[in-house]
Image (cartoon, helix red, strand yellow):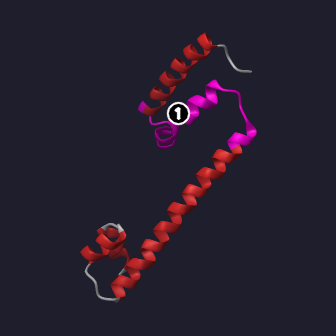
Amino acid sequence: MINNEKSSGENEDKYKHAIEKALKMGILDGYLDRKVSEVINMLTCEYDYATDVAVQREEAYEAGEKRGAYSKAIETARNLINMGMSNSQISQATGLSGSEILALH
């Protein structure tokens, strides 16, 4: 059931306050930092399974892309190490930190 406008707005303020408090307390801080608007939408709107599944798929896709990009950066760094490039050059080329590159040696 969707709340009427007035109570929905009041509830949204309460939800925002609760989320801010949770962030201050470190509860789900990583998730809430990234997903504040989605959490508020989920709390104030009617739950829609199809939309939830679509959002979860998109999040999984984005996470997979990040893992793939990181794996490619590691692979590239290893190749550049084998070519004799400096750690500084490798860091510039791949976006990896110096410590990440050192760990590959």
User: Residue drawn at (34%, 74%), measured in percent from left and top?
Assistant: 101
Residue 18 is situated, as x and y percent measured from the top left of the image, at 51, 24
Give the side of residue 86 with respect to residue 61, left or right: left
Residue 88 is situated, as x and y percent measured from the top left of the image, at 25, 74
User: Residue drawn at (48%, 42%), measured in percent from left and top?
Assistant: 34
Quadrant of the snapshot with the N terminus: top right
Give the side of residue 38 with respect to residue 2, left or right: left
User: Residue drawn at (47%, 73%), measured in percent from left and top?
Assistant: 72
Q: How many marks?
A: 1
Residue 68 is situated, as x and y percent measured from the top left of the image, at 53, 67
Give the side of residue 76 with respect to residue 39, left or right: left
The one of 74 and 105 positioned closer to us in this rendering: 74
Could you tell me the amino acid type at mark 1? Answer: Ser
Residue 11 location, quadrant: top right
Q: Which residues are magenta?
A: 24-52
Residue under label 1: 37
Residue 41 location, quadrant: top right
User: Residue drawn at (74%, 42%), measured in percent from left and top?
Assistant: 50
Quadrant of the snapshot with the C terminus: bottom left
Magenta span contains residue 60? no
Q: Is residue 77 above or below residue 12?
A: below
Question: Dot 1: few (<14), some (14–19), or many (≥20) neighbours within 10 Å?
Answer: few
The one of 102 and 86 positioned closer to us in this rendering: 86
